[in-house]
Structures are given as C-alpha cells and as structure tokens.
Image (cartoon, helix red, strand yellow):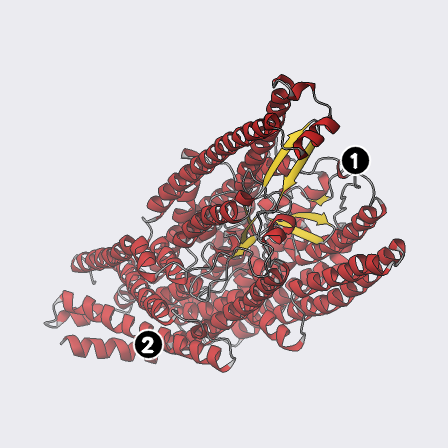
C-alpha cells in the first residue's frame, strides 16, 4: 500500500508541473550560484597569490620586516560556494607595520582589505549554497507541501482515500517519502549540473586538495535540511483548513525561522553581552603601547640623571667613554636592558590581557547568540555549511591563534635580535643581530583547520537538525491522525 | 462600481486570516529590521567617532550614512578607512559592528524586506484573485451582473493594493517616527525627501508584484497552479536575473582586478621616486609624472569598470527587483554610483597627499600636516540623471504592462 501511495504522490507532483518547475529552478539557480561564487573565489585567490608573491619578493631579510613590516596572509576558502559564512569579516592578513618591530616586541594587527571588484555581489548578496537551500529551495518545499493535506481536503480527495482501508500513518509517510524524494532528485540534478559547469568553465572547487569530502557532506546536510523543512511543511498543511492559510502560515514560519529568530538571537546577545569593536580594542592597545613607551623613556632619563658618574657626563663624554668600554657605562646600559625587558614583559602582559578579555567577551556573546539561534533549523544548517566551507567560527579561532603565533615568531626572529641604548635624547639602535641573508625573513605558513575539528564544532547542529526533522514529522503525523478530512 | 468592488476586497481582506498574518509579519519584520539596523548604525557611528582622523592626518574616512538604516547598500565599503601613504592607499576595515556572528545572519535592511519578503506577500494578495473566485463559483455571479470586466479587475487591484500599501506605509512611518526619537539619528530635510522617494519606489515595486499575481491568476485555472508558477517567477526575478546579469556582463567586459591597479600605482611611484632619485631626476617632475600616469590608469580602469557596471545594470533591469534595488540604494546614497564617485575622490585625495609628501620631503614627520578629506554626496538631480530616473520610469512601465496583460488575460478568461 505504501508503495502505491508513493507512486500516486510522485505521479501527482509530476503531472501538476511542480516537479518540472523545481527541476528547472534547481538546474538554473544551483549552477548559477556555483559559477558566481567560484568566479568570485578565483578573483580573490588571484589577489591572494599576487599579494603573497609581492610580499615574498620584497620581504627577504629580517631587516625588511623591520623596515616594511611583516605579514601572514589568509588564503580565501575554496569552498565558499557552500557558504560565504563569516569570510567577509575574517582578516585577509595579520601584520605588523614598518618601524614598529623593535626590541619591545611587534605590534600585530588584523587587516581586512578585501577589494570590491564586484559591487553587485555586495549589493544583491551572496548566492552560495546556504542561501539557495535556506531561501530558494525552502520556497520550493513550500510549493510541494502547502496543499499536501489541506489541498486534498479542499478537493475532497482526502476523504476518498481515507474511506479505503489505508492507515493514516502510511498516507502521511508516503507523502513525505514521495515529495522529499522528488525534491532531492531535483536538488541533486542541479548540484551535479553545477559541479559539471564549474569544471567545464575551469573554476572547479575540487582543484584544491581536501575539498571533495566537505562538499559531499555539505550536500548531505542540505538534503537533510530539505527533509526537515518538508516535514515542517506537512505539519503546517495538516494543521490548516485551507491551502491559502497553509501557504500564508508556511511563509510566516519561514520568515520567522530564517529571518527573525537568527537575527533576534544576535540582537539579544548584543543587548545582554555587549562587546567593543576590534578597532576600539586596537586603539586601546595602541594608546597603551604609547603610554608604556613614554613611561620607559622617562624612566631611562630618570636613571641617567640619578646614576653616579653617568649623571655628570656630557653626551660627547658618554660616547667617548662608551667606545672606551667604561664599566660604569656598561652597567648603566645593562640596567637599561633590564628596564626595557621588564617594560616589554609588562606591556606584552597587558596587551595579552586586553586581547584575552576582548576575545572572552566576544566568545561569550557569540556563544549566546549561537545557542539562541539554534532554535531555528535554518541557523543549524547555516553553521554546519559554514564550518564545512572553512568560513565559520573554527576558521576565526584559527586566525586568533595565528595572530598570537605570528607575534611570537616576529618577537623571536626579529624583535628579539635588536638592542638599543639611550643617553640624553639619543638612542643607539643595534640591528646587528638581524639575519641579512636572502630568504632569512621569517614566514608563517597558512594552515587550514582539519575537517575533524570543524565537524566537532557543529556536531550538535547536525544532531539538532535530525531531531527537528523527527519532531516535525511526529507533529505532522499526530495532527494528520486528528485531521478532520470532511 | 470600481470603488464598490475595491471596498468589498478591502473588507474581505480585513476579515481574512491572510491579512492578519501579513500585518503581523510586516510589523515584526519592519520593527526588527529598523531596530537592528539602527543599533548597527549607532555602533558604527560610535566607532567612527573613535577612529576618525585627527586634523592633518592623511586618512579618508566617511561617517556612516543615516539612510543606511533603510538601505545598507555599499555603505560598509564606503565607510572603510583609506590611509594614504607614500607607497599607496592602505584600506582598513573602518567602522565595524563587532562580532563575526553577525555575518552569518546579516540584518535584513528595509530594502531587503521589501524586495524579498513583501514582494512575496504582494503575490499572496494577487495569486488567487481570479482562479480562486472561479473555483468557488463567485466569479460567475459577479460577471453575471452588468459590471464590466475592466471595472472588476480595477476594483480588485485597487482593493488589494490599498490592503497591502496602507498597512505597509503606516508600519514604516511608525517605525521611522520611533527611530527619530533617538537624538543620534538625524535626518536632514533632503534625507526625508529621499526616504519619501524610497517609499514611493517600494509601493511601485509592490504594485507590480500584485499585478503579476493577478496576471498569473487570470492565466491559470487553479489557485494552486497559480502560486506554483508565481513562486517560480519570483525566484527568477528576485534572485536569478540579478546574479545572472553581472555574470553575463563579465563575459563581455574584462576589468582588471583592483589589486592590479594598485600594483601599477606602486610601480609608477617606485620608478619615478626611488629610481628617479638615483638617476637625479627632478623630484617635482617625478610627482607630475606620477599624478599624470595614475590619473590615466585610473581613467582607463574606471572606463572599463563603468562599462561593466552599465552593462550589468542594463541586463539586470530585465528584473524589476534589480531596478528597484539600484534606484533605491542610489537615492539613499549607498549605491554603486555613489561608491564609484567616492573612490574617484579618494584617488584625487591620494594624489594631493602624495604631492604634499614629496613636496615636504625634508620636513620632520611630526610637523607634516595634510588637508582633510572632504566628500560632497551626489544631489538627487545627479542621482536621477545617473539612472535612478530611468529605473523609476522602468518600474512604472512594469506596473502598466503587467496590469495591461492582466486585463487582457482577464477579458479572455473562461469563468465556467
């Protein structure tokens, strides 16, 4: 009986052009989205490669880092076609500016310098798979489900079906199986066409290693989301008395789940746990650094004025005695070195504290927003696809770690090899410890987040998505059992 | 008679579940959007106050546009910080509203709500106007009397249009009034006029989708078929064509990446300044060469880029959704035209600053000061001349043509 009902539902959907329209829409919108996203990726990849090439050409020695500043660049995600995620807000590089790397350590900042080569993309929004699945395909699901129960009631065919010895669970299960199978077929056809088109145009996402498995999982998750939304459609249809009210209710539910709930969760998180912006924190750090430099300068001057022998020396006398390796001067400079080391340790400690405090607040705010947004299956799928694409929170976290690692590298390889001594208003900088050999400039290789770690960040979303599917189907089942077919 | 039918439609809408849900949706969406965008604007303004350049600093930074609360457009790109240095322009993030989680769920601005959600709502008002009445048998009764089909259609359109437009305008005006309670949000009279124009365009846009709904309803026998066809057309107009247009345009007009342009700027600077100094070339002559060559490069680039934008725009205009977004964001001052003009002004500012840097070569760094960056937004006249007038006329044309086609389809409709 189940098979007969499934066949009947499939035949119905094919006869009333719904499947055909779904297929046409999938065959247009998915390949279009893939090509637009991949073209954008290729352009950004080109910019990234050129930037890295230029940087490597112009930064070959330690001294180049001191004079021009250093940087570590973030390659764009090759799977941005799955989800653009938070990529527009992620840094394009972590860098230090020229003449800011000295013995006190490097001042490291994120930079986001995405050029706007395609203003239409910024204006019309991304057409990645996440958007297609949660907006366009969600609409298709509504078309498939809004009259699945209410429509049959209006046409009075439901009463005829129920007059036979067909258990209601079988009817609702057959509707779910047939409709979601057709939708899945249309979606998979569109995806296959999209992949083939990107390969034909030479912009395949699979030209980069490690992209096939996350892409395949992303497609599986999209199918799961369509099933969840299909069950939701069945639930709404079996709760409605007419097709129009089912359609209006479904539209409202979609708006609530895709637009209101995720955004409201962000608003609530912003209100409950406000956080400063990165620019403000950078400014705070910069002010702190300036203050620390001024304090150190004053302390050295004070020391020069109070140290016996030194305090009575003129500048020329100091320089002369320095060349003569006067022990009093050596002791004075040793004391300066200790003072600077102490100031540097204090400064770095304070800067780390500001960073840690900021990150802690930001993480708490994000966690609250994220947990609240999980009330919507749309949020769950958005998070999963973003992590699979390498444009989610795991990538952001990695860049926070990269910033710290980059600072450690520059401090050790460049800043730590410099020394300076001051007397009166003159400072002697010694960069003799820096490596002048071509290719000696320290480099931080770009590393991606392993897939296992990215999946571990979203396993709860996958489980929730499955639970939502079951919950909606159970709801549709119960309401269909109680449905008055007259 | 037209007004009688319109009144009947309004009353029947007022009593329907559909109207109640739609009204609730409008209130929720407009309120959520204005609240989030307003907060975002306040945060960006606070950031701007902190990071705004001190007098004499060679940094081009614009304050956020208050109309970006309604039409975000490219405002975030426009309000980035452009630091002018001797080796070129360094672009920084500018004002940002903080946590990356916001990028997952960017706030839908007013234009997004009108363009995506309310267009769908307008279709819901129109999709069953003819086919459902036929299914219920009421259309036969109406047309059985002496009323003309033209009057019936006009009455249906007017009644549904008012049922949609009046609550929409009321909710938006109420939201705007609440917004104005915040002393940080100050609209000039010109900005109020711009907001009025955006509302006018929104109403035109919704009018088109209502007519489209009635047209498809008059071409189909069943309401279920009508909604299926309409959702397909909606996806085509709102999502597919605007993206397809840009993609197609890029096949015909090749524009070098922005990076390549800045690379060429840097090469010219290196050649003229560093190598010129080594060869003993006069510095002033070098500056003149840099500015001349950069201007030429910029001119070439912008020529190509403008061609791309023009072609993309024209292809996208097949969809009223693109016309609406383009015109409304330009009127708000956050559109592509405005962004392009800002870029041009920043390049000119860069040339001026570089000239000053080289002229003051021997001045100690801390004594160097540079002129402040100033930008005068385009006037409404310039915006309309730049394409917004065409887009508005185009939307009016879409309205007329869709209503005319709906009329023809309804005249030929078999009511049995």
Quadrant of the image containing the N terminus of chain A: bottom left
**Residue in the foreground of this view, choosing between B389 and A245:** B389
Q: Where on the picture, by quarter, is residue B265?
A: bottom right
**Residue in the foreground of this view, choosing between B105 and B57:** B57
Task: Reply above or below: A97 against A202.
Answer: above
Point out residue B157 in the picture as x, y percentages from the top left corner: 54, 60
Secondary element at tag 2: helix
Q: Can residue A419 be seen here?
A: yes
Q: Chain of mark 2?
A: A
User: Does label 2 lie on the same chain as label 1?
Assistant: no
Nearer mark to the viewer, of 1 and 2: 1
Q: Are marks 1 and 2 in contact (CB under 8 Å)?
A: no
**Residue in the foreground of this view, choosing between B348 and B238:** B348
Q: Can residue B181 be seen here?
A: no
In the picture as drawn, the residue positioned furthest to the bottom comes out as A200
Q: Crowding at label 2, few (<14), some or many (≥20) Cα neighbours within 10 Å? A: some
Secondary element at tag 1: helix
Q: Chain of mark 1?
A: B
Circle 1 sits on which residue? Answer: B367
Quadrant of the image containing the C terminus of chain A: bottom left
Circle 2 sits on which residue? Answer: A185
């Amino acid at each position: 009986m189940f098979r007969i009902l499934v066949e009947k539902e499939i035949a119905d959907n094919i006869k009333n052009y719904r499947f055909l329209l779904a297929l046409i829409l999938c065959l247009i919108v998915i390949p279009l989205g893939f090509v637009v996203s991949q073209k954008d990726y290729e352009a950004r990849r080109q910019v990234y490669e050129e930037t890295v090439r230029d940087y490597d050409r112009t930064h070959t020695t330690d001294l180049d880092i001191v004079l021009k500043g250093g940087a570590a660049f973030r390659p764009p995600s090759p799977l941005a076609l799955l989800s653009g995620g938070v990529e527009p807000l992620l840094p394009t590089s972590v860098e230090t500016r020229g003449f800011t790397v000295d013995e006190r350590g490097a001042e490291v900042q994120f930079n986001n310098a995405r050029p706007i080569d395609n203003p239409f993309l910024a204006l019309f929004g991304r057409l990645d798979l996440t958007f297609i699945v949660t907006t366009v395909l969600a609409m298709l699901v509504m078309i498939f489900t809004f009259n699945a129960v209410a429509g049959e009631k209006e046409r009075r065919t439901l009463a005829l079906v129920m007059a036979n010895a067909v258990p209601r669970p079988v009817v609702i299960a057959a509707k779910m199986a047939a409709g979601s199978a057709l939708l899945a077929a249309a979606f998979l056809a569109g995806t296959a066409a999209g992949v083939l088109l990107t390969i034909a145009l030479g912009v395949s996402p699979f030209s980069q290693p490690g992209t096939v498995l996350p892409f395949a999982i992303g497609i599986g998750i999209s199918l799961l989301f369509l099933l969840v939304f299909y069950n939701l459609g069945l639930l709404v249809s079996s709760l409605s008395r007419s097709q129009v009210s089912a359609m209006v209710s479904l539209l409202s539910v979609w708006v609530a789940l895709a637009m209101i709930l995720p955004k409201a969760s962000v608003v609530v998180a912003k209100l409950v746990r406000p956080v400063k912006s990165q620019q403000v924190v950078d400014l705070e750090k910069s002010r702190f650094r300036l203050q620390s430099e001024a304090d150190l300068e004053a302390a050295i001057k004070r020391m020069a004025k109070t140290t016996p022998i030194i305090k009575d020396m003129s500048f020329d006398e100091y320089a002369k005695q320095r060349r003569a390796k006067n022990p009093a001067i050596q002791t004075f400079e040793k004391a300066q070195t200790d003072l600077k080391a102490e100031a540097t340790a204090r400064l770095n400690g304070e800067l780390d504290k500001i960073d840690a405090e900021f990150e802690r607040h930001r993480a708490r705010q994000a966690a609250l927003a994220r947990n609240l947004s999980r009330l919507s299956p749309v949020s769950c799928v958005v998070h999963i696809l973003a992590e699979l694409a390498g444009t989610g929170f795991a990538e952001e976290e990695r860049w926070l770690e990269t910033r710290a690692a980059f600072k450690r590298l520059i401090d050790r390889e460049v800043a730590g090899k410099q020394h300076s001594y001051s007397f009166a208003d003159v400072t002697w900088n010694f960069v003799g410890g820096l490596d002048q050999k071509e290719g000696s400039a320290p480099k931080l290789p770009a590393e991606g987040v392993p897939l296992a770690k990215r999946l571990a960040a979203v396993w709860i979303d996958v489980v929730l998505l499955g639970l939502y599917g079951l919950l909606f189907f159970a709801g549709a089942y119960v309401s269909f059992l109680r449905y008055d077919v007259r | 008679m037209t007004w009688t039918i319109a009144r009947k439609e309004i009353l029947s809408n007022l009593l329907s579940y559909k109207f109640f849900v739609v009204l609730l949706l409008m209130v929720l969406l407009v309120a959520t959007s204005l609240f989030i965008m307003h907060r975002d604007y306040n945060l960006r303004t606070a950031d701007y106050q902190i990071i705004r350049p001190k007098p004499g600093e060679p940094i081009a930074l614009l304050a956020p546009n208050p109309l970006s609360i309604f039409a975000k457009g490219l405002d975030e790109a426009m309000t980035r910080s452009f630091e002018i240095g001797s080796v070129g322009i360094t672009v920084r993030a500018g004002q940002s509203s903080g946590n990356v989680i916001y990028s997952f769920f960017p706030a839908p601005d007013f234009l997004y709500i009108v363009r995506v959600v309310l267009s769908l709502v307008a279709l819901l008002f129109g999709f069953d106007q003819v086919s459902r009445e036929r299914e219920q048998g009421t259309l036969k009764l109406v047309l059985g009397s002496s009323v003309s089909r033209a009057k019936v259609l006009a009455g249906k359109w007017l009644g549904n249009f008012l049922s949609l437009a009046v609550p929409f305008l009321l909710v938006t005006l109420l939201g705007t009034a609440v917004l104005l309670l915040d002393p940080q949000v100050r609209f000039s009279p010109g900005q109020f006029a711009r907001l009025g124009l955006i509302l006018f365009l929104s109403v035109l846009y919704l009018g088109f989708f209502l007519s489209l709904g009635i047209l498809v309803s008059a071409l189909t026998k069943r309401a279920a078929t009508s909604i299926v066809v309409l959702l397909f057309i909606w996806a085509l107009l709102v999502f597919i064509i605007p993206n397809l247009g840009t993609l197609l345009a890029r096949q015909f007009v090749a524009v070098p990446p922005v990076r390549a342009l800045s690379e060429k700027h840097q090469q010219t600077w290196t050649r003229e300044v560093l190598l010129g100094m080594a060869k003993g070339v006069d510095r002033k002559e070098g500056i003149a060469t840099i500015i001349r060559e950069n201007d030429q490069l910029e001119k070439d680039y912008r020529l190509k880029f403008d061609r791309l934008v023009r072609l993309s725009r024209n292809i996208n205009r097949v969809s009223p959704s693109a016309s609406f977004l383009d015109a409304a964001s330009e009127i708000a001052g956050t559109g592509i035209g405005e962004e392009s003009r800002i870029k041009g002004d920043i390049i000119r500012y860069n040339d001026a600053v570089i000239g000053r840097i080289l002229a003051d070569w021997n001045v100690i760094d801390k004594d160097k000061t540079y002129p402040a960056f100033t930008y005068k937004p385009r006037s409404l006249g310039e915006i309309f001349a730049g394409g917004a007038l065409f887009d508005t006329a185009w939307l009016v044309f879409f309205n007329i043509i869709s209503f005319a086609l709906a009329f023809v389809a309804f005249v030929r409709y078999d009511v049995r």
